[in-house]
Amino acid sequence: MISGFVFRALEGRIVTAVGIILAIGILVPALNLLTPADSALHIPTYVMSLFGKYLCYALLALALDLVWGYCGILSLGHGAFFALGGYAMGMYLMRQIGPRGVYGNPILPDFMVFLNYKELPWFWHGFDWFIFAMAMVIVVPGLLAFIFGWFAFRSRVNGVYLSIITQAMTYALLLAFFRNDMGFGGNNGLTDFKDILGFSVQADGTRAVLFFMSALMLSLCLILASAIVRSKFGKVLVGVRDAESRVRFLGFRVENIKLFTFVVSAMMAGIAGALFVPQVGIINPGEFAPANSIEVVVWTAVGGRGTLIGPIIGAILVNGGKSFFTGAFPEIWLFALGGLFIAVTLFLPKGIVGTIQHGFKARKALKAAADAEKGRGDATTVAQAQAAE
Amino acid sequence: MNMISETRQKSLLYLENVSVSFDGFKALNSLSFVVEPGELRAIIGPNGAGKTTMMDIITGKTRPDTGTVLFEDTIDLTKKDEADIAQLGIGRKFQKPTVFESHTVWDNLELALNRSRGVFATLFYTLSPEDKARIGEILETIRLTHRSQEYAANLSHGQKQWLEIGMLLAQEPKLLLVDEPVAGMTDAETAETAVLLKEIAKTRSVVVVEHDMGFIRELGVKVTCLAEGSVLAEGSIDFVSNDPKVIENYLGR
Ligand SMILES: Nc1ncnc2c1ncn2[C@@H]1O[C@H](COP(=O)(O)OP(=O)(O)O)[C@@H](O)[C@H]1O
Ligand SMILES: [Mg+2]
């Protein structure tokens, strides 16, 4: 049963994609660590961390695609799950600072000393323990998604209304995390991290491992997502997207289907956020900004929603473009992003990967039809070819 | 005593004095309606008579304001939702054909198959030989074997209607509600659909809503005529179509 579940996931394209991602995950750190700084092949640490950030965004986009591309739930709040995963990691990193802060308090992080905290708030307990913090990276976003989804899906909030309340959710969290008395460092967030599991977060070796971990988690989540969408459950998911009432009248509990997918997706987003934070060195409430969640939608749309590889490619391309533009012409980036989204919606509604796959299938269909005409194709290949159109 | 228990047959579906209004408009007005086990019943009536609304109420999509809706004499359907009711064994074909267009014909049937529908059961589901055989059988019944690997989006209108009927068969319902199955079909398809429904009705109860009088005649079963949310006449097609009220409200138009 389980083996069938995993086996189905490893369809050709996914194996190739995982192979490429893992190869990058090994090659980039190797070129960073093993080549001298003046070598043409050397990848500087800041570039590696920048790419590592893209891998985290790719995982976030994959998470969004699972709910949006496959289940039709347009979440405009996935940035919140990403940020919560990031905060869980940030809290662990803060606790690792120990007495090395500016105020030298062995228990309280600097911002708490500054704000006159007498003791560690209850929800900070346990975060000095890596395993606990990593569990929180998936539990907290998962729990929020569960509670949110429980109410939203049970009351059958759909379409644009659901998008609006997800946006409201991330906005509410933005406001909450801005407050100093929330105990998450307010406006400044969490930063000045020292080490992770005893290794300096600044060290090249640590950065290399973080990069590899980003590639590994992206690969594992890609395999999981593939297993989900290729199972019967995944077919039901697409059914919910395309004809929700039909699914209901077939006897499926649509609210449970959506809830499960939303929670899994939120957990993936949390993992992405957790890997993001040590690579960029800070987490602040800005990550909850509604615009961030909307950007994720753009990446996914550009790459191709409803395909698994699309959001990964979209996230990397758009963020690569963003890094370039904000360096070269900072003032036009937002216009470029907006223009890109409109262009993709108008001219490539299936996104880059979706369009390529579509073209590929159409060519196969043409070929099969030609074969059939020559009398070589049997009825089934023609049927398949027509189906593929 | 014996006489009474014999005449009081167990009903499969029992509606009594069901009323529902939308913004003050009475879509159903004290509707009473009984379907017996194994029965094939046709429902006719002008547009807006409440035929679709009646199906909405039976399948849990709409809650009645007042009235009783019982399945198998004991189960109160007004307390259940769509998924529960589907699992109890009531299948429904929509007026507009509703299939999963981005899935193949085969996958459409696989999804509809009456198997455990929980999240984890579907995640770890693998197609067993029995399930394969069952899907093969249904494909034969709905005459779509040769197109099983085709995306449902590429089927003709009539074939989509059949696929949807096939999905309902896969659900193994005790009661099948079919809303205007031959709307938009060619004459040949209409005739074949009548054969198909009669075949299906051998093993379960079927309620068919239809406008096409030729089709109803072909079915040759008891007919209920609805108008303005309640039953106008009930009986054989000849009886109903000679009823002055039916002629005035429906046929005469
Ligand atoms: N959800 C709804 N909201 C408002 N009015 C409705 C709703 N459903 C049905 N109606 C109205 O109830 C009446 C009966 O509709 P319907 O059951 O679809 O008729 P039929 O299927 O017999 O043509 C129509 O006038 C329709 O406009
Ligand atoms: Mg109707």
Image: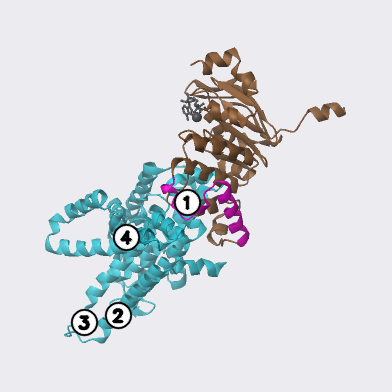
Tell whether A174 sits left or right of B112.
left
Q: Considering the image in quadrants, where does the N terminus of chain A appear?
A: bottom right
Q: Colour of chain B?
A: brown
Secondary structure mostly taken by the magenta-highlighted segment of the chain: helix
Identify residue type, mark 1: Lys
- Residue A243 or residue A64, whichever sits in front: A243
Q: Which residue is mark 3?
A: A42
Q: Would you say the residues marked 1 and 2 are in contact, meaning their CB atoms lie under 8 Å apart?
A: no
Q: Considering the image in quadrants, where does the C terminus of chain A appear?
A: bottom left
Q: Which residue is mark 4?
A: A363
Could you tell which of marks 3 and 4 lies nearer the N-terminus? 3
Tell me the crowding category of disc 4: few under 14, some 14 to 19, or many 20 or more residues within 10 angstroms, Cα based. Answer: some
Tell whether A355 sits left or right of B250.
left
Q: Residue B134 in magenta?
A: yes
Could you tell which of marks 1 and 4 lies nearer the N-terminus? 1
Could you tell which of marks 1 and 3 lies nearer the N-terminus? 3
Identify residue type, mark 3: His
Q: Which residue is mark 1?
A: A258
Q: Secondary structure at mark 4?
A: helix
Both marks 1 and 4 on one chain:
yes
Output the letter for the chain in cyan: A
Residue B21: x, y in percent? Answer: 52, 24
Residue A122 visible, this angle:
no
Both marks 1 and 2 on one chain:
yes
Residue A374: x, y in percent? Answer: 36, 61
Q: Is the residue at mark 1 in contact range of ligand 1, meaning its CB lies under 8 Å from it?
A: no
Q: Is the residue at mark 2 in contact range of ligand 1, meaning its CB lies under 8 Å from it?
A: no
Q: Which mark is residue A27?
A: 2
